[in-house]
Amino acid sequence: AFCGGAMAEIFVVLRNLEPVIKHVEKSLNDAGLLVSREKADFDAEIAILLVGAPQKLLERQAQAERREKKLRDSFACHSPRRSEQQGWPVRRFTISQRHLFDGIEQPDFFTPAERASMVMAMLAAVVKDSTTFNAALAAANIEERVDQEFALLDALARLELMHDVSPLHFPAERARAWRLIIANLRSACTSPLRPLVPLDTLRAYWGEQVAYYFGWESFYIHALGVLALVGLATW
């Protein structure tokens, strides 16, 4: 964790070239992101940067992405839209009305999947400064130059200076998610109409695409079960 309780969400693996790494650190810090460097004891030729974002920056990104978050019960109960959708009460997050949202004071207001997605989006949006970037390349004895306007990560990838960029896992939250999944599978054996996996848990930790996939698979299995019963009765 960084100072202030912010968590590292993304790791970036770079070639261990000090001028380039310092340029990347400065560029990310200038964009408001939090960066720390970790030593890669298993390989001296690479360096690992851990990247996170403070709560205020996450809230600003959530507002820009028009993400929906759950309202406090005291505000949701008076809304005329409450019965119009299954996931109600939710509303698009806005900083000006942040006090309306449930759990806004908590460090886990945004789920692990939301935090990783937003930090990755902010990381991908950082644009390099050609002058200082090329100066860093020259200091690292790299002959190539990048004069076109590229995002910083794209420029690093084009020059093969970046090996990987990926979300971090959180062992405690992942273990909790697995416990809920196993408990749900056990209860699904006695409740045939219950989803095979807890979709909210999958969505919170692994993201919406993974939750959607397993939601479809759960529906498909239940649908095949009905057809199987019809077929058995006909047979």
Image (cartoon, grey):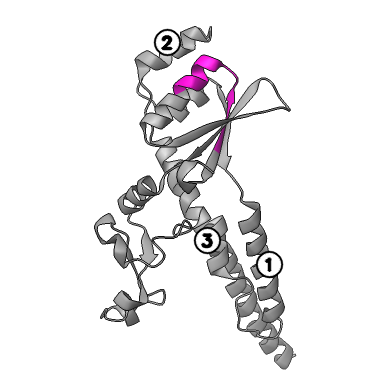
Q: For the residue labelled by badge 1, is the local secondary structure a helix, a strand or a loop?
A: helix
Q: CA distance from mark 2 to mark 1?
A: 50 Å
Marks 3 and 2, the one that precedes in the sequence:
2
Name the image quarter holding the N terminus: top right
Q: For the residue labelled by badge 2, is the local secondary structure a helix, a strand or a loop?
A: helix
Q: Nearer the viewer, residue 69 or 148?
A: 69
Marks 2 and 1, the one that precedes in the sequence:
2
Q: Is residue 80 above or below residue 126?
A: below
Residue at 66 percent across and 20 percent down: it is 45
**Mark 2, residues whose alpha carbon is within 10 Å: few (<14), some, or many (≥20)?**
some
Quadrant for residue 228, please give it.
bottom right
Query: Are discs 2 and 1 less than 8 Å apart at CB?
Result: no
**Mark 1, residues whose alpha carbon is within 10 Å: few (<14), some, or many (≥20)?**
few
Residue 135: give its label: 2
Whether residue 146 is visible: no
Residue 179: give its label: 1
Q: Is residue 116 above or below residue 49?
A: below
Q: CA distance from mark 1 to mark 3?
A: 14 Å
**Amino acid at the residue labelled 3:** Ala
- x, y percent for residue 98: 30, 60
Total marks in image: 3
Query: Are discs 1 and 3 less than 8 Å apart at CB?
Result: no
- x, y percent for residue 147: 37, 15
Which range is magenta? 11-23
Whether residue 203 is visible: yes
Q: Which residue is mark 3?
A: 204
Q: Nearer the viewer, residue 32 or 14?
A: 32
- x, y percent for residue 220: 60, 73
**Amino acid at the residue labelled 1:** Arg
Quadrant for residue 44, please give it.
top right
Q: Is residue 122 above or below residue 132?
A: below
